[in-house]
Amino acid sequence: MTESLITTIQALNSVLYHAMEMDSSVIVFGEDVADPEDGGVRGVTKGLSTKFGDSRVRSTPISEQAIIGAAIGSAMAGMRPIAEIMLMNFMPVAMDMITNHAAKLRFMSGGQTAVPLTIRTGTGAGFGTAGQHSDYLEAWFAHTPGLKVVTYSSPADAAGLLASCIFDDDPCIFIENFPSYNERGKVPEVGYRIPLGKASIVHEGNDVSIISYGPQVRVAMVAAEALLSEGVSVQVIDLRTIVPWDRETVLNEVAKTNRAVVTHEAVKAFGVCAEVSSVIHEELFSQLQAPVQRVGAPSCPVPYSSILENEFIPNVKKVIDAVKVTLS
Amino acid sequence: MNKRSLNGRNGTLNQVNGLPEKEVFLNIYRSISLIKNNDEQACKAIKSGRIKMIYYSPRGQEVIPSVISAILNKDDYICTIYRGSHDMLAKGVPLDLLWAEFAGRITGTCKGKGGPMHITHPESGCMITTGIVGSSMPIANGLALASQIKKDNKVTVAYFGDGASNIGAFHESLNMASVWKLPVVFVCQNNRFGEHTRFEKATAVEKVSDRAASYLMPGIHVDGNDPIAMYAAAKEAIERARSGGGPTLIEAMTFRFRGHVFGDGDRYMDKAEKEVAIRSDPVPRYRKWLVDQGYASEEDLADIDAKNELRVQSAIKKALDASWPDISELYKDILASNVAH
């Protein structure tokens, strides 16, 4: 398999291109996604409308409900729409379409209809865009049965997971993160897919397991390296898919280390880390050497001032401290 | 009602689906009769305690979907709403499956997992029933978008009420449909009330159809209880959609005879207004017209009614005799692969 060093944006663009090329039911629409509008505000969809035409690739009005409605209806009628919601904070505008409809139509129709759509959306603090442009809201969607929620920690994973979302038969929310966009990495060529629902062990270790996903995986990796110099062997598990999450891998691995930290950039309270932590406690209580620790953002909106924003994002030190609590 | 209005610029009935005019008129009556009978028996079944379900009666609104479905093809799509059993039956959702779903049985359209507010039956083109005001429209656009891209020549009808014309999804959907010239017909069944609030009190315009101008879309205001006028409006809109001419907004004026949700007591309704509406019940009016035109005798129509009554009775009985869903259904149809989490 040949590999090249490309950015996450290029990796995502390439996946979209090849999906459209191999399957005529794949269509792309969202605000500014066509080439006359710059191929997306971050260029992820660049070149698609020129290659595949204005019928399959459409810039839309700024109408999030109508965008997701169009994705749901076309998905029910046999298409594989990829709708872009520019920012994760714009998802709430379409919440009725996502949670009342996309998520529930398979169940409420008794399996007669399916909604194989992918919503690409982006977010991430660290750029001074404050309370309405940089939230991680994955827990809202994870709490709604019927949706798959997916995110990545490297350009290769971005490619492999997006391809799997596009060709999955359920509604998938694919969360892109801004810090990753210009990161370069080796990405396998056309056709690379990573199965949804399978976690990946990205750092080996025997003493403590850190469970994470998205850009926070990198924070966990840095923490693991730093702890190694202190003689602590830390394992890092990247969930890759938030729903359905890989309980089997997480429980198997924590059963070996008997200590766990769960971390994400999203607000800690009522977050995904709470579910993962609870399941570990329920299943492995008697053998845990310490209570599972959670590291997430404080319960406040993403702040603007850089000094506040830096503190808001769960950093390496907080993860290291949490690991040490499990060892104390 | 004036039969001549059918013979205007929109052609005559006998051009539709290869059926002679008389047969089309009688099919419309069969549908109206079925819906009315179904509603009456539903109300009885709820009152007597035979069935327990949430029910939004379409009594008084039978004509609109009966006429539209006479023009639509079987594989055209509809998206309807919680007050939608008339739209479903007119489009051909099988009575037995409908009632089994009402009863929450495994034999229902949706295995008893959706219920009266979420009837779905793709085989008859009923793609979604939503319990959320305004949400039929964005999804109808998506079905129409698929048809436009695949060039499959299908038309999608989005049914909704006057209340839904005040929610944001209406604006987003009509704008997008017009920008993209989607093959969709937006049918507002204006029954004069959104939940318990009068249309005039909640709506800034006199006619919902006037709002079409904002989208450079044809807007048609029509008496939805007049099958002849309704026919002309629907035919024009459906033909425009099918021929690539884009969407139409039809505001079909009607009245709901049994309040918002069955059993709400409709104290908020003006008694005199309701009486006037019920006195001009569209069903006996249409019956009389069919007889006057010589399309059917009283006996013919009574025969249609009697057959429908038996069909509904049989559907209710079958539904109540059917099995409940197994508890394992809680864990099925969540995701394609039934991942248990």
Image (tube, helix red, strand yellow):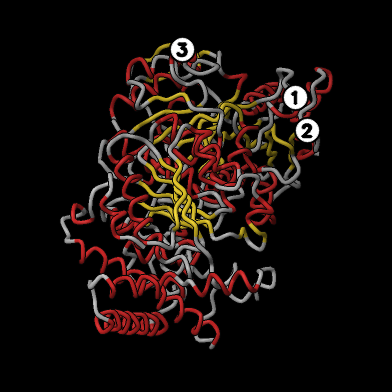
**Which of the labelled discs sits on residue B33, or is there none?**
none
Q: Which residue is mark 2?
A: A301
Instruction: Name the foreground residue: B41 vs A228.
Output: B41
The quarter in which the C terminus of chain B is drawn is: bottom right
Report the mark closest to the observer, 3 or 2: 2
The answer to whether residue B272 is above or below residue B66 is below
Is residue B22 toward the left or the right of residue B59 in the image? Answer: left
Q: Which residue is mark 1?
A: A130
| Mark 1 in CB contact with mark 3 (< 8 angstroms) | no
- Please, which chain is the residue tagged with disc 3 on? A
User: Distance from label 1 to label 3 (Cα)?
Assistant: 29 Å
Q: Position of residue B72 (x, y in %)?
A: 29, 53
Report the mark closest to the observer, 1 or 3: 1
Q: Position of residue B119 (x, y in %)?
A: 43, 63
Q: Tell me whether marks 1 and 2 sit on the same chain.
A: yes
**Residue B41 in view:** yes
Mark 2: give few (<14), some (14-19) or many (20+) Cα within 10 Å: some
Q: Which residue is mark 3?
A: A6
Q: Earlier in the sequence, mark 1 or mark 3?
A: 3
Residue for point 30% across, 83% down: B302
Residue for point 47% across, 16% down: A39
Instruction: Name the foreground residue: B165 vs A16.
Output: B165
| Mark 3 in CB contact with mark 2 (< 8 angstroms) | no
User: Distance from label 3 to label 2 (Cα)?
Assistant: 33 Å
* SS state under label 1: helix
